[in-house]
Amino acid sequence: MHWENPAGLTERQAQVMRLLAEGLTNPEIAERLVVSVRTVDNHVSAVLDKLGVHTRRQAAARAVELGMWPGR
């Protein structure tokens, strides 16, 4: 099946969106996805608060500064 990508997503982002779209057509999977997304969002919010930053990009930069991530 061909998928349009008008938002200019990366291949990985497009793959995630396809999985979400396919999963949301199945009520059981849709419920699990909602719970999973909320859980991830809660973890991301906690990390942002802990690091004292406001965006995911700032969190990534901070992780590199702290030696938690090798960076590019």
Image: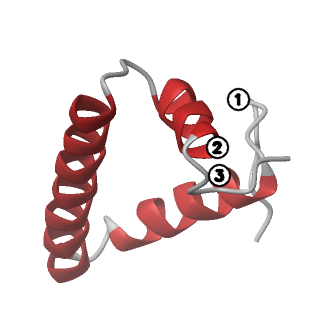
Cα distance in 3D space between marks 1 and 2: 28 Å
Q: Which residue is mark 3?
A: 13
Depth check: give the residue in front, 68 or 2: 68
Front in this rendered view, residue 48 or 23: 48
Amino acid identity at mark 3: Gln
Query: Residue 57's image quarter?
Result: top right
Q: Position of residue 17 (x, y in %)?
A: 54, 55
Q: Quadrant of residue 25?
A: bottom left
The vertical placement of 25 against 41, above or below, is: below
Q: Is residue 30 above or below residue 21?
A: below
Callout 2, which amino acid?
Answer: Val
Horizontal side of residue 45 vs 70, given as left or right: left
Q: Residue at x 31, y 33 (%)?
A: 48
Figure check: 18 above or below 56: below
**Distance of label 1 from label 3 (alpha carbons):** 10 Å
* Tag 1 and tag 2, C-beta contact below 8 Å: no
Report the residue marked by disc 2.
64
Residue in the picture at 30% in, 45% down = 44
Question: Could you tell me if the residues under marks 2 and 3 are in contact, i.e. CB atoms within 8 Å?
Answer: no
Q: Secondary structure at mark 2?
A: helix
- Work out how far the residue at label 2 is from the one at label 3, CA to CA, in angstroms: 22 Å
Question: Which of the two residues, 11 or 66, is positioned nearer the viewer here?
Answer: 66
**Looking at the picture, which amino acid does disc 1 mark?**
Ala
- Horizontal side, residue 5 vs residue 32: left or right: right
Report the residue marked by disc 1. 7
Give the mark nearer the N terminus: 2 vs 3.
3
Q: Considering the numbered disc 1 on the image, is that residue within a helix, a strand or a loop?
A: loop
Residue 66 location, x and y as percent? 54, 44
Mark 2 nearby-residue class (10 Å; few <14, some 14–19, many ≥20): some
Q: Residues within 10 Å of mark 1 (few under 14, many from 20)?
A: few
